[in-house]
């Protein structure tokens, strides 16, 4: 497991995520300056996958649970937004309720639904551990994936186009810039929330159980319940990310739910660093930018990408989040020598 | 007998054909230090693990203050007041000594579904935790991560965690295992102090420590207690000498 010292928050712990958020917040300005709106689209994608990777890492880095069903849960959130918008557009009630394109309603519903799905998946999967947990979550991911394909009414394999304009309460967020800042606020909140959770009593119990289950049980902590609750929180948050992707693209599709997308989220987290809350956000940013740059050079970009990931993970055991510390260490060593 | 904190009756545990615990009965009185001695492989740690709940007995009764707990899972038994210090040190490598004790305090003070406040700034956890750390003499190392503690210090921390649980019954599985003579003597002095406060079961190979600390000693051979008595009686018993002390 990664290095998760449970010490109180120090200002310098808050610095890297603050820089990350500030950098992201500046991208629309840069996009306007250089007249390239595509940059905002990329930044939005980075922000949304950052939320997903940070959410995953709550159970991965702090709960010691390698889940491969998070793309499925991500998709559940997306489909809640998509389906509600479809009913809104077609003026067809969902049972006794109206559909809606208002994210103030559909985002919380997406979080609840994916949280519930996570509760069901977790209640069963958490009876196992290690490779079995991995395989069961993978199986659940595929169930959700094929479940989405089976939704013939909502586009099945082709996915579902959102025809109405999404809003947030009275605000229209169909504007690309506004939507970006909405997503950024959600990312900031996610970082803040998970940061608090990790340091709370709940987080301490969760981490202790992840790193030494015998010890946690011996002092009176039942790992199962804490893992389950962490899994539900993580699932709800990843559902919000999926909901944002659907709303931002005006489109949701089973493709985003396939199991290799779950793998991508794990790679983002590990790449950025699973020992700190903000690590996976950095990982998601690097992942998406690299994917974009490398794939514009060659169609065999995944080969180069894979090598890079291996290189980074092998040289920086705490992921990219460790870069600062590693550089500081090298400088200290040099200073000592000189 | 009326004031037994722990009563064990006819406990059985087999691994395949091996009877690790064979019709084991004993009791621990309140405030007593009850040592269990026996040759290697006698089933001492297996017995402790069944008391703690990590192992399920095949049959038998375990009563803590009169209540049968044999069916309770380990984490619930910990909350009921059973604390175990492990024979092989079991710590969280990147938690500090103080973090470990605070974890124990946290676990005994109700559920941990508290999400907002930083646990490491919570005086309700830290104050009792620090007290436990200081009791075992680790005060100066409170903020050291477990991975950086010496073997002796890690053994002390094991004990501090158990104390921080404020248990009714302390299960000490070779608290001096692997310690040098000096650390071992310090641990013996520490246990002598604690013994007034806690009821405890002590497993230890250091016979000097056992005979100086124990109020009663039970001799375990092949999963069965062959004799229980005051240290002087045990020392004089010919059968015990033959089974264990003789060599």
Image (tube, coloured by chain):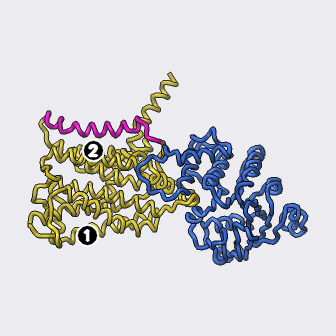
Image chain in yellow: A
Residue A324: quadrant of the picture: top left
Chain letter of mark 2 equals: A
Is A126 placed left or right of B190 in the picture? left
Query: Nearest the camera: A95 or B151?
Result: A95
- The answer to whether A119 is drawn above or below residue A107 in the figure is below
**Image point (12%, 36%), residue name:** A35
Indicate left or right for A247 with A22 as reference. Answer: left
Q: Nearer the viewer, residue B8 or A125?
A: B8
Badge 1 marks a residue whose secondary structure is helix
Q: Is residue A17 magenta?
A: yes
Residue A50: give x, y in percent of width and height: 30, 48
Q: Position of residue A248 (x, y in %)?
A: 17, 52
Q: CA distance from mark 1 to mark 2?
A: 29 Å
- Magenta part of the protein: which range? A8-34
Q: Quadrant of residue A144?
A: bottom left
- Residue B212 appears in the rendering: yes
Mark 1 vs mark 2: give the one in front. Answer: 1
Measured from the top left, where is residue A274 in percent x and y?
Answer: 41, 48
Q: Nearer the viewer, residue A154 or B202?
A: B202
Chain B hue?
blue
What secondary structure predominates along the stretch shown in magenta? helix
Number of marks in the image? Answer: 2
Viewer-proximal residue among A256 and B98: B98
Density class for disc 2 (Cα within 10 Å; few <14, some 14-19, many ≥20) is some
SS type, badge 2? helix
Residue that numbered label 2 is attached to: A290
Mark 1, residue position: A146
């Amino acid at each position: 497991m990664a290095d998760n010292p449970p010490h109180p928050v120090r200002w310098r712990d808050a610095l890297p995520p603050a820089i990350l958020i500030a950098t992201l917040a500046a991208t629309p300005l840069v996009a306007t300056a250089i007249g390239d709106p595509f940059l905002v689209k990329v930044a939005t994608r980075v922000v949304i996958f950052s939320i997903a990777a940070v959410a995953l890492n709550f159970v991965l880095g702090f709960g010691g649970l390698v889940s491969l069903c998070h793309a499925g849960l991500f998709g559940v959130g997306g489909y809640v937004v998509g389906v509600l918008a479809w009913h809104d557009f077609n003026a067809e009630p969902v049972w006794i309720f109206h559909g809606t394109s208002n994210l103030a309603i559909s985002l919380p519903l997406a979080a609840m639904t994916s949280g519930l799905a996570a509760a069901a998946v977790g209640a069963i999967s958490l009876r196992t551990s290690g490779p079995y947990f991995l395989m069961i979550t993978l199986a659940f991911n595929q169930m959700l994936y094929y479940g989405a394909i089976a939704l013939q009414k909502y586009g099945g394999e082709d996915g579902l186009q959102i025809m109405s304009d999404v809003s947030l309460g009275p605000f229209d967020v169909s504007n690309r810039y506004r939507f970006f800042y909405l997503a950024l606020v959600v990312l900031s909140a996610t970082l803040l929330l998970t940061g608090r959770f990790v340091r709370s009593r709940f987080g301490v119990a969760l981490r202790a159980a992840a790193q030494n289950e015998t010890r946690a049980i011996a002092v009176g902590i039942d790992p199962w319940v804490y893992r389950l609750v962490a899994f539900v929180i993580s699932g709800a948050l990843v559902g919000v990310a999926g909901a944002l992707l659907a709303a931002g693209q005006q489109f949701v599709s089973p493709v985003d739910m396939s199991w290799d997308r779950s793998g991508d989220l794990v790679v983002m987290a590990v790449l950025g660093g699973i020992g700190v809350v903000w690590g996976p956000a950095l990982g998601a940013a690097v992942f998406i930018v690299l994917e974009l740059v490398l794939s514009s050079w060659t169609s065999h970009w995944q080969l180069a990408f894979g090598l890079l990931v291996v290189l980074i993970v092998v040289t920086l055991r705490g992921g990219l989040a460790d870069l600062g510390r590693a550089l500081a260490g090298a400088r200290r060593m040099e200073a000592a020598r000189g | 007998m009326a004031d037994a904190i722990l009563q064990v009756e006819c406990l059985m545990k087999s691994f395949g054909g091996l009877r690790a615990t064979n019709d084991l009965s004993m009791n621990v009185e309140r405030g007593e230090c009850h040592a269990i001695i026996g040759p290697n492989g006698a089933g001492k740690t297996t017995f402790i693990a069944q008391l703690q709940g990590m192992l399920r007995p095949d049959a038998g009764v375990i009563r803590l203050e009169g209540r049968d707990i044999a069916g309770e899972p380990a984490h619930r038994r910990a909350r009921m007041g059973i604390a175990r210090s492990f024979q092989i040190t079991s710590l969280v490598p990147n938690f500090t000594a103080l973090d470990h004790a605070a974890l124990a305090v946290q676990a005994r003070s109700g559920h941990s579904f508290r999400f907002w406040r930083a646990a490491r700034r919570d005086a309700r956890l830290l104050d009792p935790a620090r007290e436990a750390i200081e009791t075992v003499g680790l005060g100066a190392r409170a903020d050291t991560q477990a991975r950086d503690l010496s073997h002796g210090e890690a053994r002390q921390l094991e004990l501090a965690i158990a104390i921080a649980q404020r248990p009714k019954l302390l299960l000490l599985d070779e608290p001096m295992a692997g310690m040098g003579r000096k650390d071992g003597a310090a641990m013996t002095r520490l246990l002598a102090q604690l013994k007034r406060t806690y009821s405890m079961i002590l497993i230890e190979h250091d016979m000097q420590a056992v005979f100086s600390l124990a109020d009663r000693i039970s001799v375990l051979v092949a999963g069965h207690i062959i004799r229980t008595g005051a240290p002087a009686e045990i020392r004089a018993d010919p059968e015990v000498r033959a089974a264990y002390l003789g060599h």
